[in-house]
Image (cartoon, rainbow, N blue to C red):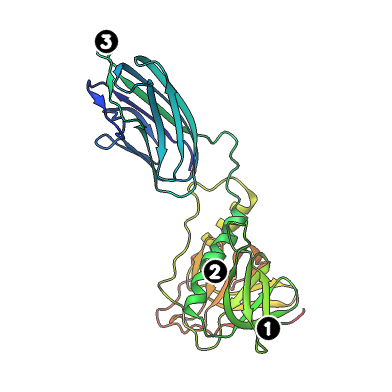
């Protein structure tokens, strides 16, 4: 994330024909998650964000009747044109490119039916400088990352446990049961905000994802080893959310027997089966009846002994998972 910069130059004579890209043959500077192909003239953005581009081309002549037109053209259909009615000399342009989906490409293209001939009087015929605009960017919110992690897991659970009756616990005293339908995203939103269940009466249960503490996908379920997890930023941003979530992931070793308090009337107990940034899974050694826990919602973790010092036998039988609803 961030610290992306690229400088490319053309030193060769020749021309750029109609609908062709300006080919920069040398790369004086490149840093960050970006690539340039000096055979095609394509710049490849490997991460989303806002980029600032400045370019200059020095021409000897142009066969296009109205001067020179060069256009920054991206694979995301962005076009920013620089033009002049002069057929020779220095032509400059600039633009701000917003990359929504990576990878994406960008080139500087001749968008006329004429040929442009590079100057033979100077060593640098063309130059382009690109930087990522992170000056006002805020560091990632790791609480929101944990919610995104839960969304990522839920989307896979809906496919794996599509016909099971789930029990979903929230920060309130109630639990909600039903067969999973989908994750609902508002028309103008980027990510889902609601988990939709269909209850025994055929009615919808709409649960705000941010309020979910535990998901139990039902009796007879088995953890799917094909589940994937989002990778947190490296390095982690400096924040109290980062510290807390990182501590939970670091401290709870796989196989550790725990009891977790998750609200005034909800607790979960079992062995740590997976511990990813933002989500902890409790289950037995075979992955039976897994319980998925949102790490930010954990209020208390009880462990007998100190996990880094525990030596657990290989044949240790892990207890069943259970959600205990009580007030104490």
- Image location (x, y in percent) of residue 93: 45, 24
Mark positioned earlier in the residue sequence (1 or 3): 3
Mark positioned earlier in the residue sequence (2 or 1): 1
In this picture, residue 112 sits left or right of residue 311:
left
Task: Tell me: residue 174, above or below residue 88.
Answer: below
> What's the CA distance linking mark 1 and mark 3?
77 Å
Task: Confirm whether residue 272 shows in the render.
Answer: no
> What's the CA distance linking mark 2 and mark 1?
30 Å
Residue density around tag 1, few if under 14, some if 14–19, many if 20 or more, within 10 Å: few
- Image location (x, y in percent) of residue 318: 49, 82
> What's the CA distance linking mark 2 and mark 3?
65 Å
Does dot 1 land on a helix, a strand or a loop? loop
Q: Which mark is residue 280?
A: 2
Residue that label 3 marks: 121
Extreme-top residue of the structure: 121
In this picture, residue 111 sits left or right of residue 101:
left
Q: Are marks 2 and 3 in contact (CB under 8 Å)?
A: no
In this picture, residue 56 sits left or right of residue 283:
left
Residue density around tag 3, few if under 14, some if 14–19, many if 20 or more, within 10 Å: few
Task: Tell me: residue 328, above or below residue 74.
Answer: below
Q: Which mark is residue 203?
A: 1
């Amino acid at each position: 994330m961030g610290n992306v910069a690229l400088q490319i130059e053309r030193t060769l004579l020749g021309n750029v024909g109609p609908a062709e890209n300006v080919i920069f043959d040398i790369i004086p500077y490149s840093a960050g998650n970006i690539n340039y192909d000096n055979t095609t003239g394509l710049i490849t953005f490997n991460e989303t964000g806002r980029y600032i581009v400045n370019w200059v081309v020095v021409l000897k002549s142009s066969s296009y009747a109205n001067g020179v037109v060069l256009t920054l053209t991206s694979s995301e259909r962005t076009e920013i044109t620089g033009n002049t009615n002069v057929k020779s000399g220095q032509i400059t342009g600039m633009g701000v490119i917003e990359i929504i989906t990576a990878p994406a490409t960008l080139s500087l293209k001749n968008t006329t039916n004429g040929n442009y001939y590079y100057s033979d009087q100077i060593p640098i015929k063309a130059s382009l400088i690109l930087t990522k605009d992170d000056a006002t960017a805020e560091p990632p919110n790791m609480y929101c990352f944990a919610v995104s992690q839960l969304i990522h897991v839920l989307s896979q659970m809906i496919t794996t446990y599509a016909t099971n009756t789930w029990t979903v616990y929230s920060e309130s005293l109630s639990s909600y049961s039903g067969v999973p339908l989908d994750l609902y995203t508002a028309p103008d939103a980027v990510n889902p905000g609601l988990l939709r269940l269909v209850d025994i009466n055929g009615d919808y249960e709409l649960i705000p994802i941010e309020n979910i503490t535990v998901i139990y996908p039902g009796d007879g379920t088995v953890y799917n080893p094909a589940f994937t997890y989002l990778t947190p930023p490296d390095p982690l941003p400096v924040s109290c959310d980062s510290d807390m979530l990182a501590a939970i992931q670091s401290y709870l070793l796989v196989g550790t027997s725990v009891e977790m308090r998750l609200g005034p009337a909800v607790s979960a107990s079992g062995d740590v089966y997976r511990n990813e940034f933002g989500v902890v899974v409790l289950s037995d050694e075979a992955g039976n009846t897994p319980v998925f826990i949102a790490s930010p919602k954990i209020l208390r973790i009880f462990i007998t002994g100190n996990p880094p010092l525990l030596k657990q036998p290989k044949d240790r039988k892990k207890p069943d998972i259970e959600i205990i609803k009580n007030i104490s």
